[in-house]
């Protein structure tokens, strides 16, 4: 699923580079925000404590989030696995994807 935040930030980065230049403070802040959105990180409790995972998508049939991890530093993709988790089992951190359904018909 495409994320609206990532799509909008991508457009803003392009415009900011054109208007302000690639090294401008505003462009740099927008690029940091875009990087955070692309990471799509969440935290889950495991037997070894809190671990970071990457949110892949939401499975509407099961009503669960599909995540990949746990993510180590440096990253070791061979040790990561894809699992599903209920929203109550994960903690959304900065850059986590969310969809606000109730705002579709709001006056704004």
Image (cartoon, helix red, strand yellow):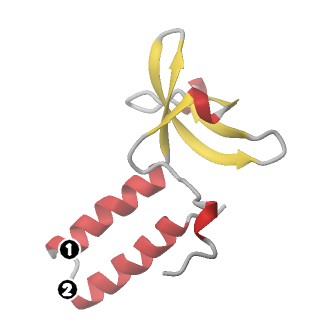
Disc 1 target residue: 26
Q: Alpha-carbon distance for marks 1 and 2?
A: 8 Å
The secondary structure type at the circle numbered 1 is helix
The quadrant the N terminus occupies is bottom right
Q: Residue 57 shows which numbered tag? A: none
Q: Outermost residue, top direction? A: 47
Residue 33's quadrant in the figure? bottom left
The secondary structure type at the circle numbered 2 is loop
Q: Residue at x 24, y 74 (%)?
A: 27
- Does residue 46 appear to the left or right of 93 in the view shown? right
Whether residue 81 is situated above or below residue 9 in the rendered picture: above
Q: Which residue is drawn at 20% across and 73% down?
A: 26
Mark 1 or mark 2: name the one nearer the start of the chain. 2
Q: Disc 1, disc 2: CB below 8 Å?
A: yes
Q: Residue 20 shows which numbered tag? A: 2
Task: Rate crowding at label 2 as few (under 14), some (14 to 19) or many (20 or more) other CA atoms within 10 Å.
Answer: few
Q: Position of residue 102 (x, y in %)?
A: 62, 63
- Does residue 16 appear to the left or right of 103 in the view shown? left
- Does residue 59 appear to the left or right of 55 in the view shown? right
Task: Rate crowding at label 1 as few (under 14), some (14 to 19) or many (20 or more) other CA atoms within 10 Å.
Answer: some
Q: Which residue is drawn at 46% across and 24% down?
A: 51
Q: Outermost residue, right direction? A: 61
Whether residue 34 is situated above or below residue 86 in the rendered picture: below
């Amino acid at each position: 699923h495409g994320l609206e935040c990532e799509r909008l930030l991508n457009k803003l980065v392009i415009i900011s580079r054109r208007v302000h230049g690639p090294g401008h403070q505003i462009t740099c802040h927008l690029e940091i925000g875009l990087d955070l959105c692309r990471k799509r990180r969440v935290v889950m409790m495991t037997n070894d404590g809190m671990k970071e995972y990457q949110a892949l998508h939401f499975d509407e049939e099961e009503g669960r989030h599909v995540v990949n991890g746990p993510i180590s530093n440096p990253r070791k993709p061979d040790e990561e696995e894809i699992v599903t988790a209920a929203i109550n089992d994960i903690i959304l951190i900065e850059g986590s994807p969310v969809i606000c359904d109730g705002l579709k018909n709001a006056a704004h």
